[in-house]
Amino acid sequence: MPYIELHASSAFSFLRGASFPEQLAETAARLEMPAMALLDRNGVYGAQRFAVAAREKNVRPIVGSELSMEDGGVLPVLVQNRTGYKNLCELLTQAHLRSEKGSCLVRWDELAGFASGLIALVGSGSGSCRSALAGNSSPRSIPFGEAPNGAREGACAPRIADPTPSGFLPSTPTLPLRGPAGPARIARRTHAA
């Protein structure tokens, strides 16, 4: 099974990424990746340049963003469709308008309203989701609820519908979700020990 990078940052993520979006697409093609995700911090700054360059190299571009959360955590999200892109842009705009210049903080309680069409990657460095996965059940660490049978993987999800894998990320376990705005997905990154 081919490797797909789901959490690359470009030079538009200051001090986090060093390559331009076109260089990332070129590297993905050289490494024969069928797809790559670009997640710049608090924006979709390099998305257009990346999408054009990736398509020219026959690499499927996946767009997303790293969201800086109000508690200091970071939540990487991928766009699944046009609705997801719209929701991500609206969420980022709302957070930028509310925050001080140079800052962009997303509140956990606003995620459910923008969940449709987005996939969140929840792993070991995901702030409040990490706390929820570890079992800390303060109101700030479990913003939405728990998965069926008490599984902690869905603790950062609005409401769990059916815990079957999604075809969108075949190598990543996913939990289909339902938020007020419609279906969404939260993916849990797995790391080999």
Image: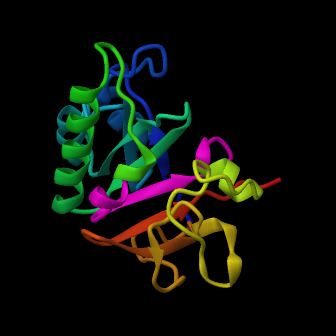
Classify 102 as above or below 179.
above
In the picture provided, is 20 more to the left or to the right than 157? left
Q: Residue 79 magenta-drawn?
A: no
Q: Quadrant of residue 149?
A: bottom right
Classify 12 as above or below 173.
above
Please state the total of marks drawn on the protein image. Answer: 0
Considering depth in this image, is 42 or 100 the residue closer to the camera? 100
Considering depth in this image, is 122 or 182 the residue closer to the camera? 182
Classify 18 as above or below 50.
above
| Image location of residue 43, percent across then percent down | 29, 32
Classify 69 as above or below 113.
above
Considering depth in this image, is 68 or 54 the residue closer to the camera? 68
User: Going 18% across and 61% down the picture, which residue do you hit?
Assistant: 83
Q: Which residues are magenta?
A: 111-128
Quick one: which residue is furthest to the front in this view? Answer: 139
Quick one: which residue is furthest to the right in this view? Answer: 193
In the picture provided, is 24 more to the left or to the right than 127? left
Q: Quadrant of the N terminus?
A: bottom right
* Colouring chosen for the image of the structure: rainbow
| Image location of residue 123, percent across then percent down | 63, 51
| Image location of residue 30, percent across then percent down | 42, 40
Q: Quadrant of residue 153?
A: bottom right
| Image location of residue 37, percent across then percent down | 39, 46
Residue 31 is at least partly visible in this image: no
Considering depth in this image, is 72 or 23 the residue closer to the camera? 72
User: Going 28% across and 65% down the picture, which residue do you hit?
Assistant: 116
Q: Residue 121 magenta-drawn?
A: yes
User: Going 39% across and 31% down the picture, which residue do you hit?
Assistant: 105
Residue 57 is at least partly visible in this image: yes
